[in-house]
Image (cartoon, helix red, strand yellow):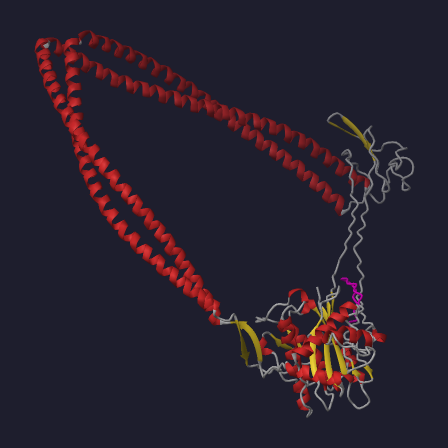
């Protein structure tokens, strides 16, 4: 996209004592390039023919030779693929046979392992029966009873040890709980004091915020940049870049009129370009300035105008809140009577889309003096009006708005010769340099944007006549003076002390919040600590009782253990001989059980090996079947490629430019190759049991179900795209402060542009 901002002045009228001026608007033209490309390609259909190659004279072209070679290569590749498939199949069959033999061996291994395991398992059963027959039950019962008694005594002793440890831990926990409770009480008292201190600090910080001004006026020294040229504007990035002196551009004499500037390609960024890289000024919401912003804009405008007047030895204009109020009434009047943003609204401007003297007095004078009862059709003060304009989209901040004001006033001062008043000075310039014996009062108001986002920039200048109203106006004007800006600029900024006070107050609130939470936590901890003391003491009492109970159970278990040991000694003496035979039987049983475990594991390993070989055999069978299926596909492809080879050879034969055979007619109308399939077939081939005859016609393509084929060599036509576009930007000339006429038509291949800029009358 290309963006261009065209600069347009507002017209200037002189009616009696009235001076009128125009401002600046912006037209943004965009161009796009669109390329439409349509490509059409006809498909070429080919027919298959029999491979019947004769010895007749023929003209062989590189195309037909390549076709035959490609078809022969495809047949050769198919034959190679079939040979490789057959070799792979034979190899896999050999592998399959080896696997089948190995699998049979693994099955024999399983059978042998099963037999050995069964034999040993039967022996284990016999060993178990022998041991059971020799077992002395009375001795075994005594042995089991002694074992149980020993386990019970050991457990009782462990219980006493554990109960002792639990009681000691409970005592420690009770002591610690009491220490924690004492510390929690101290922490709660400290947190309560910290909370009270934080509350007092928060109260003090809040009082400081309430007693500190939110904003202060800050003065900044300006850089006093000079204007650029009509092609390259000086960048404005921050408030510090704004000039307070009106300096004549270096090329002002060359482009001292609107028409000359337009011819030179002036844009909105000529001389001064708003960039705003470090713009910290206030934002303008929806293009509507607040009263404070209106005041700030008026002060900047007055500073530039008075600097220009001083350069010419004239006394400065003045400004007051009263004159600013009159400009506000002017803006309200314009809205009431629907005065367009590019039309004037001074008293008696009805022939230019403005208001009458009566409407002006009713809208402004009566608001100033509601009790006024004079003739509203008469003029009671001198009022000049210069009119500028601004697009709200290009003035989003106060810095951007001040740049637009600077551009308007600079053009009034140095680019106004289209409005030559006959004395070598334009009307705009003369308005700024008006010499008046009395005081000249200045005001500026930037109106609410219209539906096209255009705002009028009203430069109102008031002077008073020597009459009652004039005297009262002079008194009211002087009662509320507003000074122009000093060198540099003043801004209303947030008071650092207020910001610090707010931050301190917020910190105090945060500390209070933390102190409150800390107290709540400390109080919670204290209550929990008290509960912990009670729970720990209860647990200590339970642990002490549990130790006593465990000690009593240990005494009983030790008595029973002594009795069981004596009973076992008596049984051992009674069954001494039988016990030897029983021990020998158990030894044999244990040895056979170990052997059985080894044989059972060997059986499991043999079965796993058999499963692996069976799976490998199945995989091999599947691979063989896959190779067989692949062979079918390869044989089918070979047949197809052989047919294609025959067709290619036949096409080469039919492509002869001078065929002396009786089967060809140069007119392609009758015998031999017949375009309409009305003649006889001149070629035939007998392959795979099929019979086909082929005719070719360069104008049509027919496929008949009886095996006759006509082929049409397709033609393709590619139609590219032709984009023709033009761009024409014309600036019209209207009797209005803003005049724009643009027509944009953009393309890729042809572009014609005529960009025009400002239009001023």
Up the image or down, 568 lies above or below 641; here it is above
In percent of width and height, residue 522 lies at 32, 50
Position in image of residue 53 (x %, y %): 77, 36
Quarter residue 500 falls in: bottom left
Residue at 18%, 12% (x, y): give it. Answer: 585
Quadrant of the rendered image containing residue 466: bottom right
| Spot occupied by residue 445 in the image (x, y as percentages of width and height) | 70, 74
Question: Does 743 appear in magenta?
Answer: yes
Give the image location of residue 380, x and y in percent: 78, 82
User: Is residue 176 shown left or right of residue 268?
Assistant: left
Query: Residue drawn 67% across and 30% down?
Result: 636
Along the viewing direction, whichever of 547 and 652 lies nearer the viewer: 547
Q: Nearer the viewer, residue 565 or 605?
A: 565
**Quadrant in the picture for the C terminus:** bottom right
Residue located at (70% from left, 39% from top): 71
Numbered circles on residues, count: 0
- Residue 270 in view here: no
As drawn, 505 above or below 678: below
Q: Is residue 341 among the parts visible in the rendering?
A: yes
Residue segment shown in magenta? 742-755
Type of secondary structure dominating the magenta stretch: loop
- Residue 102 on the magenta segment: no
Picture quarter with the N terminus = bottom right
Above or below for 436 versus 674: below
Pick the residue in front: 334 or 73. 334
């Amino acid at each position: 996209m290309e963006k261009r901002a065209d600069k347009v002045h507002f017209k200037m009228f002189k009616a009696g004592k009235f001076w009128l001026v125009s401002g600046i608007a912006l037209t943004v033209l965009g161009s796009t390039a669109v390329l439409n490309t349509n490509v059409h390609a006809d498909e070429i259909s080919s027919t298959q023919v029999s491979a019947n190659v004769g010895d007749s004279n023929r003209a062989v072209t590189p195309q037909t030779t390549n076709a035959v070679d490609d078809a022969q290569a495809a047949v050769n590749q198919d034959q190679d693929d079939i040979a490789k498939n057959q070799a792979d199949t034979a190899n896999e069959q050999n592998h399959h046979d080896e696997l089948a033999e190995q699998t049979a061996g693994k099955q024999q291994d399983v059978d042998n392992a099963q037999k050995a395991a069964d034999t040993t398992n039967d022996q284990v059963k016999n060993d178990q029966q022998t041991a059971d027959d020799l077992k002395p039950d009375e001795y075994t019962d005594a042995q089991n009873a002694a074992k149980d008694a020993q386990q019970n005594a050991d457990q009782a002793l462990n219980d006493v040890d554990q109960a002792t440890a639990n009681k000691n831990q409970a005592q420690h926990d009770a002591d610690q709980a009491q220490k924690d409770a004492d510390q929690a009480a101290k922490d709660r008292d400290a947190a309560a004091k910290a909370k009270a201190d934080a509350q007092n600090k928060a109260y003090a910080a809040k009082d400081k915020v309430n007693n500190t001004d939110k904003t202060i006026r800050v003065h900044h020294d300006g850089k006093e940049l000079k204007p650029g040229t009509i092609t390259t504007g000086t960048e404005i990035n921050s408030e510090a870049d704004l000039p307070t002196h009106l300096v004549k551009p270096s090329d002002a004499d060359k482009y001292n009129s609107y028409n000359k500037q337009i011819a030179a390609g002036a844009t909105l960024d000529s001389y001064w370009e708003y960039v705003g890289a470090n713009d910290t000024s206030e934002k303008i919401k929806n293009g509507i300035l607040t009263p404070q912003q209106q005041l700030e804009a008026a002060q900047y405008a007055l500073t530039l105008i008075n600097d220009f007047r001083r350069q010419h030895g004239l006394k400065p204009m003045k400004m007051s809140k009263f004159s600013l109020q009159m400009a506000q009434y002017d803006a309200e009047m314009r809205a009431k009577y629907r005065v367009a943003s590019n039309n004037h609204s001074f008293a008696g401007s009805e022939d230019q889309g403005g208001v009458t003297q009566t409407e002006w007095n009713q809208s402004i004078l009566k608001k100033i003096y509601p009790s006024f009862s004079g003739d509203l059709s008469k003029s009671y003060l001198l009022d000049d009006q210069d009119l500028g304009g601004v697009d709200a989209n290009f003035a989003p901040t106060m810095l951007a708005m001040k740049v637009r004001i600077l551009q308007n006033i600079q053009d009034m001062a140095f680019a106004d010769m289209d409005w030559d008043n006959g004395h070598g000075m334009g009307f705009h310039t003369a308005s700024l340099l008006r010499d008046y014996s009395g005081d000249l009062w200045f005001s500026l108001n930037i109106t609410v944007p219209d539906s096209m986002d255009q705002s009028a920039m009203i430069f109102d200048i008031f002077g008073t006549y020597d009459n009652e109203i004039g005297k009262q106006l002079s008194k009211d004007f002087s009662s509320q003076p507003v000074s122009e800006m000093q060198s540099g600029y003043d801004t209303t900024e947030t008071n650092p002390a207020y910001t610090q006070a707010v931050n301190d107050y917020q910190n105090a609130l945060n500390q209070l919040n933390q102190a409150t939470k800390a107290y709540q936590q400390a109080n919670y901890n204290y209550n929990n600590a008290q509960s912990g003391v009670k729970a720990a003491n209860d647990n200590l009492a339970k642990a002490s009782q549990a130790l006593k109970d465990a000690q009593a159970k240990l005494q009983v278990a030790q008595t029973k253990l002594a009795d069981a040991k004596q009973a076992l000694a008596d049984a051992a003496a009674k069954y001494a001989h039988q016990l030897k035979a029983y021990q020998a039987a158990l030894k044999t049983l244990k040895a056979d059980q170990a052997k059985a475990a080894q044989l059972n594991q060997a059986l499991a390993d043999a079965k796993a090996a058999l499963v692996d070989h069976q799976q490998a055999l199945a995989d091999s069978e599947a691979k063989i079947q896959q190779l067989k299926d692949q062979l079918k596909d390869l044989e089918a492809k070979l047949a197809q490629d052989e047919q294609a080879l025959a067709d290619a050879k036949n096409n080469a034969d039919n492509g002869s430019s001078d065929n002396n055979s009786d089967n060809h007619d140069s007119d392609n109308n009758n015998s031999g190759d017949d375009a309409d399939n009305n003649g006889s077939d001149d070629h035939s081939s007998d392959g795979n049991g099929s019979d086909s005859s082929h005719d070719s016609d360069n104008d049509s393509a027919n496929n008949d179900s009886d095996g006759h084929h006509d082929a049409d060599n397709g033609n393709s036509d590619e139609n590219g795209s032709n984009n023709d576009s033009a761009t024409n930007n014309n600036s019209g000339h209207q009797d209005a402060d803003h005049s724009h006429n643009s027509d944009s038509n953009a393309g890729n291949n042809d572009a014609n542009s005529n960009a025009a800029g400002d239009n001023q009358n």
